[in-house]
Amino acid sequence: MVLALLLSAIQLMGVSGNDLRVRAFFDANNVKVGDPLILTVDFLGDAEFADLHPPALSKAVNRRDWKLDDISAKTSTFRDARRLTYRIRPMREGVLWFPA
């Protein structure tokens, strides 16, 4: 399973700035059912990210395919980026699609 997303411009609630981009990826490609994956979502650009908080991604995924605990989301702030990390577990075998 691989998720890669790069958007050249995005409008984020509570964030204003220039050249805003998003990049998302999993930490592994092949896992067993129930094994944890770490989803990292980076918001990049010349902006103030203090008001950007982790959205509830569990509402956007198929619960039959994924177990996602929104409360486990962690945030890190860097000079020109805000990083959100989520712990996610696949709930069945196969090639699973994770929504962008």
Image (spheres, rainbow, N blue to C red):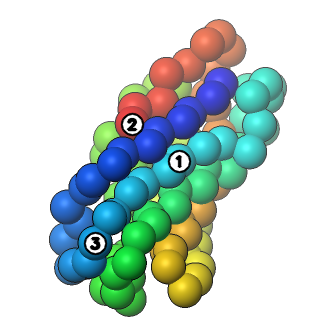
Q: CA distance from mark 1 to mark 3?
A: 19 Å
Q: Residue at x 74, y 45 (%)?
A: 27
Which residue is at a point 34% across and 81% down the rendered structure image? 47
> Looking at the image, do the residues carrying marks 1 and 2 touch, with CB atoms under 8 Å apart?
yes
Q: Picture quarter containing residue 10?
A: bottom left
Question: Circle 3 is placed at which residue position?
Answer: 18
Q: Which sits in the foreground, 58 or 17?
A: 17
Seen at 54% across and 36% down, the residue is: 4
In this rendering, the answer to whether 70 lies above or below 79 is above
Q: Nearer the viewer, residue 34 or 23?
A: 23
Q: Alpha carbon of mark 1 to alpha carbon of mark 2: how far? A: 8 Å
User: Disc 2 designates what residue?
Assistant: 100
Pick whichever of labels 1 and 3 is earlier in the sequence: 3
Quadrant (top left, top right, bottom left, bottom right) of the C terminus: top left
Q: Amino acid at mark 2?
A: Ala
Seen in the picture, residue 82 relative to 77 is either above or below; the reply is above
- x and y percentages locating residue 73 in the rendered image: 54, 67
Q: Of marks 2 and 3, which one's residue comes earlier in the chain?
A: 3
In the image, what residue occupies the spot 28% across and 72% down? 18
Within-10-Å neighbours for mark 2: few <14, some 14–19, many 20+: few
Q: Nearer the viewer, residue 9 or 31?
A: 9
Q: Give 52 or 73, whichever is nearer the viewer.
A: 52
Q: Label 1 is placed on what type of residue?
A: Ala
Residue 46 position in % (x across, y down): 38, 78
- Secondary element at image label 3: strand
Q: Is residue 41 left or right of residue 56?
A: right
Residue under label 1, please give it. 24
Q: Is residue 32 left or right of residue 40?
A: right
